[in-house]
Amino acid sequence: MDRIKPRKQVYNGMPARDLGSEGWHKPWSGGNGGNCLEAMKLADGRIAVRQSTDPDGPALIYTTDEMTAFIQGAKAGEADFLLS
């Protein structure tokens, strides 16, 4: 898995462009016209997430534990209320 070493301090809400343009991946994509999330594994193990249609917008930074809890919860249906 790619691990990008950022050029400056990484913080939640920082401009995604400051993390560089390489290493971003679309973990899934559907029939939503290209509106999806992109994720990047950082050198320290955290995960950066950005909106694909706004690559210069803010990046949300999550720990591995936070991302694991989110994915496991989504798989278990705990986020289904967001779709109703």
Image: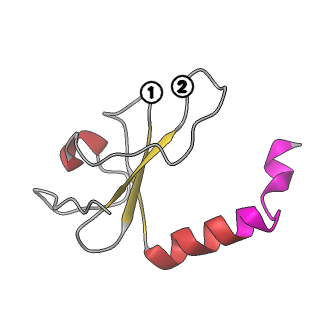
**With respect to residue 61, does 33 lie above or below?**
above
Q: Nearer the viewer, mark 1 or mark 2?
A: 2
Kindly report the distance in space between the C-alpha atoms of the residues bearing marks 1 and 2.
8 Å
Residue at 28% from the left image edge and 64% from the top image edge: 42
Position of residue 5 measured from the top left corner of the image (x, y, whole percent): 16, 62
Residue 27 vs residue 43, the one in the foreground: 27
Position of residue 8 measured from the top left corner of the image (x, y, whole percent): 12, 58
- Quarter of the image for residue 52 reads top left
Residue at 89% from the left image edge and 43% from the top image edge: 84
**With respect to residue 48, does 69 lie above or below?**
below
- Tags 1 and 2 in contact by the CB under 8 Å rule? yes
View extreme (front): residue: 1
Count residues near mark 1 (Cα–Cα under 10 Å), then give few for <14, some for 14-19, many for 20+: few
Position of residue 19 measured from the top left corner of the image (x, y, whole percent): 22, 49
Does the stretch in magenta take in 5?
A: no
Of the 4 image quadrants, the one containing the N terminus is bottom left
Residue at 83% from the left image edge and 62% from the top image edge: 77
Disc marking residue 53? 1
View extreme (bottom): residue: 65
Name the residue that disc number 2 marks. Answer: 34
Position of residue 24 measured from the top left corner of the image (x, y, whole percent): 33, 46
Does the stretch in magenta take in 82?
A: yes
SS at circle 2 = loop
Left or right, residue 78 beside residue 73: right
Residue 14 vs residue 63, the one in the foreground: 63
Which of the two labelled residues, at mark 1 and mark 2, occupies the earlier sequence position? 2
Highlighted magenta segment, given as a residue range: 73-83
Residue 24 vs residue 78, the one in the foreground: 24
Residue at 37% from the left image edge and 59% from the top image edge: 12
Left or right, residue 62 beside residue 29: left
